Amino acid sequence: MPGVITSIKAFIVKVQFDDDSPNVNELISIQNGYDTQLLVDHLEPGGIAFCLNIRGDLRLIKGMPAVRTNKGIEIPLGEKTIGRVLNALGDPLDGFARLTEEDVKFKDILKLPPKAVKFEVTKPEILETGIKVIDFFTPFVKGRKIGIIGGAGVGKTVLTMELINNIAKSGSGLSFFAGIGERIREGHELYETLKENDLLKSTCLFFAQMNENPVQRSLIGISAVASAEYFRDEEGKDILFFADNMYRYVQARNELSTILDQVPNEGGYEPTIFSDVKMLQDRLSSNENGSITSVQTIYVPADDISDPAVQFIQHEMDSVIVLSRKVAEQGVRPAVDLTQLNSSLLTPEIVGERHYVLSVQVQSLLQKYESLRGIIAIIGESELSVVDRADYAKAKKLITNFSQNMFVMTKHTGVPGDFYTREQTLKSIEEILV
């Protein structure tokens, strides 16, 4: 017996099954002449399936029959997806032909991979990004996670695009990009930048931008991760995974929670925020087959870094870079707040004794600089002691030293981008500290 639609509320459709109820995360097909597909979100007693209208199809009315498909959302996998732009359902967004089962394998995005076997971690491998402030304060270590936090318009997407550009040029593995609820313009610019620099041949792109419904925005990150898992586990590749923006993922889940009439938690977000974040973050992991190294931007609503969603996501990161509006207004690019950088990877065992000692000296100088600024605002720089004036001048030089031009902004500014090796970065800092 087929099910029957009993109610429709925005993107939530209730379907009554008298027998043979579907499974959670199974697609069901509505017999409306258009084969509209819904995703079962959860089941309630009495054979009621709460389903998500994935494509936002408005051609649904109460009483329409629904049948099980016995499968979930399946996306294409493999070499033919490299260089393509896909949505959360595996449909092409680049104007090229849809991939079929004759061309590639398909995988259920919500089906978890086999549990990884414990494997020995070899010596941490540092990947050079060419960006001074990242290579020095938050080393980019293979298999780890970096979070780029900031409000609107401070340069999160530009910094992410620069990382993709610099790392992809070095030929370090296969890159994935998940555009979660961001601007269409930014997605288009990224695609064109990769195309111009002949980097599409090593990049897979997944997009559910601002114009998409919350169902697709909540699924796009999972679709991208599912594809990355295939390349890691079946092809044995090392993956570079970029997500812009993780806050939009939580926001999409929160929108769906509101439509489902779930009671929000004390922070105002969906009650499942912790499991929502963990579900995605735990899949961005490494195993004996390969690694997934991720860079995730995190939007800060109203520039409030204490926002519960920001804190939840931030706790999953090994390193955190905070972009500041105050720094951006000073014309410093990237607009990194040097006093709020945090990395568990900045240790002598990973970066070496020389790098670690320099980082301690620099952080000490920057903290002193912040305290001296308040004093200078009252009595002036000339009233400082000779030592304090010297340290203040060094700190100002360091701040300027960490500013650099971006390759991805060259076509807008006309100024060529800069790439610095870690050795060049360390030498430039040593010259200032002498």
Image: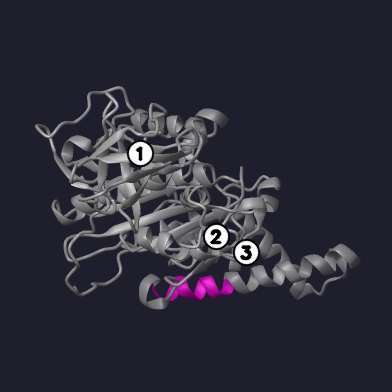
In the picture, which quadrant includes the C terminus? bottom right
Magenta stretch: dominant secondary structure: helix
The crowd level at tag 1 (other Cα within 10 Å; few <14, some 14-19, many 20+) is: many
Q: Does residue 221 appear left or right of residue 201 in this picture?
A: right
Q: Which residue is mark 2?
A: 263
| Residue sitting farthest toward the right | 379
Q: Quadrant of residue 336?
A: bottom right
* Position of residue 165 measured from the top left corner of the image (x, y, whole percent): 39, 41
Indicate which label's residue lies in the foreground, 3 or 2.
2
The answer to the question of whether label 2 and label 1 lie on touching residues, with beta carbons closer than 8 A, is no
Q: Is any atom of residue 405 visible in this view?
A: yes
The crowd level at tag 3 (other Cα within 10 Å; few <14, some 14-19, many 20+) is: few
Q: Does residue 370 appear left or right of residue 123 in this picture?
A: right
Amino acid type, label 2:
Val
- In the image, the segment drawn in magenta is 352-361
In the image, residue 254 lies in the stretch drawn in magenta: no
Q: Residue at x 52, y 71 (%)?
A: 359
Indicate which label's residue lies in the foreground, 3 or 1.
1
**Which numbered circle lies on residue 108?**
none
* Position of residue 47 measured from the top left corner of the image (x, y, whole percent): 30, 53
Q: Which residue is mark 1?
A: 5
Residue at mark 2 to residue at mark 1: CA–CA distance? 25 Å
Amino acid type, label 3:
Ser
Q: Which residue is mark 3?
A: 306
Secondary element at tag 1: strand
Q: Is any atom of residue 165 visible in this view?
A: no
Which of these two is toward me, 326 or 263? 263
Residue at mark 3 to residue at mark 2: CA–CA distance? 22 Å
Q: Earlier in the sequence, mark 2 or mark 1?
A: 1
The crowd level at tag 2 (other Cα within 10 Å; few <14, some 14-19, many 20+) is: few
